[in-house]
Structure formats: structure tokens, C-alpha cells
Amino acid sequence: MTCRLRRFAWFLALALCAVTGVHAQTLRVGLAEDPDVLDPTLARTFVGRIVFAAMCDKLFDIDDKLEIVPQLATSYAWSADNKALTIKLRAGVKFHDGETMDAAAVKYSIERHKTMPGSNRRGELAPVASVDVVDPLTVRLNLSAPFAPLLAQLADRAGMIVAPKVAQAEGDK
């Protein structure tokens, strides 16, 4: 099912609930298989991608017009030479463990995606040479060369930010 059809089906379900007066119920989604792992750095299957879409926010998302829009980010700006991407982050976001999602967590996650053994995000983020914490809600990704697909990569698993304390404690689990 295409992204637009899925969103239409979701919208239709909400509209039916509004019209019929049905309130919060359980929605069950059946998948033909289980995700391979529940770690966006190591994940590689399409089914995992579907599960992550329901569980994890990303720096960016793709809207119904197929445009890249901020999700955990609020805005972004490219440097004049297109070799640095500065991202402003949403304030007040917490991970499931209560830890704050901030620029340090983004830096940790991007670096984890790039360096963790077995990472399937390494190639997607290969042009990212370094990550700077500008302030608690601003991060800058420094690139070795201009890389037009970067925002699209950050709208998928490479843009999923993990809670640093939990990720450090659990490792590849």
C-alpha cells in the first residue's frame, strides 16, 4: 500500500470514529513477519521499517505531498557551500525513560549509526564527517562533500534518535 493510501485509510478510520461517535479503541495491525531487530541502527528489513514508523520519531518526515518536513527538528539550514547542515530541535521532547532528547542525543545517535559494528546506517551517513553540538537544541552535521539525499536519509532510520543512556546500557540489544 502506498504512503498516500495508508494515510487515507488512517484518515478514513478517524473520520468514521468521529461520525459514529466511537472513541478510543485498540487498533491491531497484522504483519506477515516480525521485524529483524528493534534497533534502528542495526535494522535492515522493510517490516522493521514499518514497525519503527510507529515507535520512533525521526529528525524529519515525509508529508502527504512527499515533501520533507521537520519532525524532531523544527527547522534546518544549509551552509553556503552545502557542506554543513544546521538543525534546530524541538524543545521538551523526552525519551521513554524520561531522558531529554537534545543536541547531545542527536550527536550520540548519528555517531552510533556511523560507528556501531553491524550498522546498516553507516553507508547512509557516510558523507557526515562530524557532528557538533552548537547549543542544547541545535546540532550541526559537517559533511566531507555536499550530499543532496541527506534530509531524505534523516527522514528514515538514520534520523531516528535513540536514548543515549539506554543505548549505552543495552549495547546491540
Image: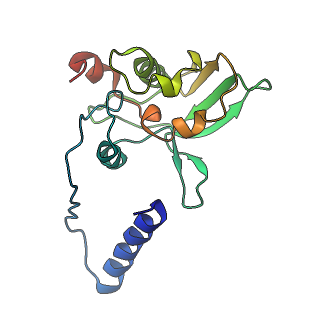
Query: Looking at the image, what colour scheme do you see?
Result: rainbow
Residue 15 location (% of width, % of height): 39, 78
Quarter of the view holding residue 116: top left
The spot of residue 111 in percent (x, y) is 45, 17
Work out which quarter of the rendered image holds the C terminus and state it.
Answer: top left
Query: Residue, x 21% and y 20% (percent of image)?
Result: 170
Indicate left or right for 98 with 75 as reference: left
Percent x, y of residue 147: 65, 28
Relative depth, front residue between 144 and 135: 144
Picture residue at 69% right of the left edge, 20% below the top? 145
Relative to the observer, which residue lies in front, 25 or 83? 83
Image quarter of residue 25: bottom left
Left or right: residue 145 versus residue 131 is right
Residue at the farthest bottom position: 20
Instruction: Tell me where residue 150 appears, x and y as whole percent.
Output: 59, 33
Rendered residue at 25%/79% (across/down): 22
Give me the residue at 36% from left, 41% from top. Answer: 56
